[in-house]
Every structure is written in structure tokens, then in C-alpha cells.
Image (tube, rainbow, N blue to C red):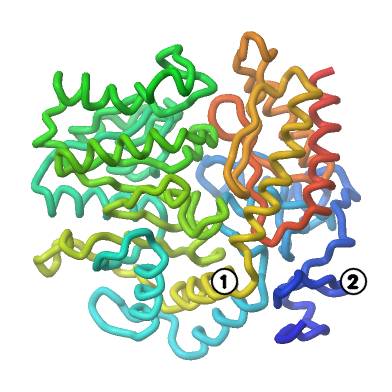
Amino acid sequence: MAGVTPDISESIPVYKKHLIPLINCHLVIDLERKPVINVPPPGPCARPIIEKDKKYLATSTKTAPIVVRRGSGVFVEDVDGNRYLDFTSGVGVLNVGHCHPAIVDAIRRQSELFLHYAGTDYYYSIQADLAEQLVSLTPGRFRKKVFYTNSGTESVEAALKLARWSTERPLFLAFIGAFHGRTMGALSLNASKPVHRARYQPMLPGVTHVPYAYCYRCPYRLEYPECDIWCARVIEEIYLTSFVPPEDLAAIFVEPLQGEGGYIVPPREFFIELKRIAQKYDILFIDDEVQAGFGRTGRWFAIEHYGVIPDIVCTAKGMGSGIPIGSIIFRAEYDWKAIGAHSNTFGGNPVACASSLATIETIRKEGLLANAEKQGSYLLKRLNELMDRYEVIGDVRGKGLMCATEIVKDKKSKGLNPKLRNRIEEECWKHGLIVLGCGKSSIRYIPPLIIQREHIDAAIEILEQAVKTCSA
């Protein structure tokens, strides 16, 4: 319990009574608190806020009528006093949980010094300190550099520009099911939902999409491992020999697990073959870790599961524990060698850097990589038990605390069932569990890395009842 003050101020929404510490861990988690729904959402306090939101804010992607008032560890509380288990982590952002005291303290301390000074034009130590950490954490023992951004899509944009600048090649390869962001360059790499691209054509020219290693729904109707990883080999044997000249191909963009595409987990050999092809033709291997990075899968970066070394790593989301920050970490020889070739105003903001450094330190000190692996294995076990009992759960997959179930019409046909998936999702949040869909017919489970078995059991109880109710 060292370093944790028992009577934390009510103004900071954190752990109050019944505190049980993690073993060898400074963080405390309230295991006795469970989801509580006092008023069916949206309640009387939430409704006017939702109406004001609809009046003044642009149409976006809101999925549930939950108006958050505060967060604490693995829980969020809405304005009507309902308490929910958060199995979204703010869409993969809050890896160390809501309002972790170490993060709050780091933000406060830096805010008292200075809030901003354009870090691409001037110097401050916290930028260099964080860059040093990022270089040491990412795979590969070669010399690297860092460029700071403010979001995942901006990281992808920076990687696109760096790849073109350094290789002087115009083309890119990406994957069907990919999600890399919503700005025009990143959007050109997307291939997960038509709505992302509708009415925005033309896209950035020069992007070719190929099928991802989606073994549950193999686009080639093959079976792993007899397929001999055709989904990767086809790139060299068909695409590069037919209409994508390898000498013009700057980079392959790939997610180590497809996020918005459905939390698809490829076989290890898929990435090994992609890397072989990239090395053979001097193509950059760009790893998008925006959703999978910073401990989410039980490794600092998910690509480590496959033993492959990327040339550029894109980060954001979990990097700042709620303060917007992203980066690309890349081989130093690819650096822009012309001042002004790329820059921004807010990248590497000092408060964001402080939050990121505190996030890294917290993951280390509290053993959250090991906890993600341990609790992720338990979560997958419980999800597989549900799959054994319910015909509408066709597949369970994931690594660490990045897991999903695919909802189907039945196991034999594997028919997509997005309407049922949406009803299950709604039934969950009505009973205090916040989950989020992904892909065409899947539900993702990405709780904070501080999650414990008791929280998972509580979540599975709600999820099972939701599946039973909605599929009856």
C-alpha cells in the first residue's frame, strides 16, 4: 500500500473504501464494488444532456446512452448514479484504469510547471525522456527516433509521409478489414466498413488492399495450417508479379490484431512471411499498434507475439491514459533530413508526455503486462465456456486483454448476426457492463489491465444472461 493515501479527495474519483491491493503492486482496486443500475439508462439526469448533445454536436459514433460523470479503476459512474464495469477502457485508452492516482499526480505536477510550448520548434526534457523510453520499449535493438502526434490517425499519417519521403516510392499495401484512422491518408488504408469511406472519394492513390489472415472466415476457403499461409504468400506470388511493382511499394501497413475489423488474430507464420517479403523487396514494415499497444495483449507491443521486428511502429490510445498523445517510433536512417518536411503544433505536449511516462512507469511497477496475460487467459477460458453452451457464439479469439466473441446465426453456417450482436451489447450495458462491437458481428472485451478475476466473473455473468435473453 506504499504510496497510496487512504483518504483520497472526493474531487478525484478513485478508490475509497474496501480497498484490496494487488500483490506486489501500489495500485489498489475495489473488488467489492459491482455494477449497480439504479435507474434504467438514460435516466432523468442523462436525458437532457443527451438532447443537448444531439442539438449541438456533430453526428458521430455514440453507441449507448451512458452519460459518464466519473471513473474509478475498472468502473464508470453515470450522472444518474449507475455504476458500470468498463470493458472498453475508453476504446483501448485507459490501460491502467480510470483516474489512476499516479497518472493524476503526474498531470497535476506538470500542469503547475507549464502546459504547452511547441515541442517541434523548441526543447524540453520530458519529450526526450519519453522518447528514450519508447525507443527502449519497441522491438529491435537498432538506432531509432520518435515523432510525436496527437492521435492514432495522425500517427498513421506521419508514417505514410515518412515512408514516402524516405523510400521515394509511391505505393502502399494494406489489408481488408483494416482500420487505421479517419483522416484522408489513414482513411485510404481503411477497409473495414463502407461508411468510413462513403462520399469521401477519391482516396489517396496508390493503396492496394489484400485479404487479412482471418482464419475463422478464410476468404480463400482454406483451412489453417494446410493453407500454408496462402493469404501472405499470395502477395508475392500474385500481387507483386501482376500489378503492384515491388520497386514502387513503399510500405506494408498491418495491425498485429485487427481492431475495428473484428479482433482478428492471425497465425504467427502470417507475420513471418509478410516480413520476409518486405525485407526481400526493401519494403517498409509498418506496425499499427494504436489499439494493441502499451500492454494490451500482455506484451508492450502486440507484434512481439510474432517475433517480427517492424521498421515503424504507430502508437496512441493507451500511451497517455486519457491525455491525447501518439507517436511513431522508427529506424533512425529513415528520418526526415529536411527541416520542415513534417511537423505539428501540439505533438509531444508536456502534460501528455508526463501522463505517458507515468503510464509506462505504472505498467512496469504494477506488473500489468503479467496481469494482462494472466487475466486475459482467464477471460478467454470463460468466453470459451460460453461458446460451448450457446449456438450463437461462433468464435472466441484474442491475446491478453484484447479479446472478442463472434456472434453468428448458428455454428454450422457461421452466418453473420449483427442485429443479435447489437442486442446483446445493449442488454449488457442495461445491466451494468459496457462492451463495444467490432467487425461485422463481434463483441470486443478490452477492460483495463488492472482487472481481476472477480471483475471478469461479474462481467461473464452479465454477458451470459444477455446472450441467453437475446437469443431465446
Q: Is residue 315 left or right of residue 39?
A: left
Give neighbour class at mark 1: few <14, some 14-19, many 20+ (Cα, 10 Å). Answer: some
Residue closest to the eye, 179 or 374? 374
The tag on residue 57 is: none
The tag on residue 18 is: 2
Name the residue tied to disc 1: 364
Instruction: Look at label 2 and name its amino acid.
Output: His
Residue closest to the eye, 178 or 211? 211
Instruction: Look at label 1 and name its amino acid.
Output: Arg
Q: Quadrant of the N terminus?
A: bottom right
- Dividing the picture into quadrants, the one containing residue 368 is bottom right
Residue at screen point 32% across, 60% down: 140
Residue closest to the eye, 389 or 370? 370
Cα gap from disc 2 to disc 1, whole angstroms: 25 Å
Q: Position of residue 272 (x, y in %)?
A: 34, 39
Residue at screen point 84% across, 42% down: 431
Give neighbour class at mark 2: few <14, some 14-19, many 20+ (Cα, 10 Å). Answer: few
Q: Is residue 203 left or right of residue 170?
A: right
Q: Quadrant of the C terminus?
A: top right
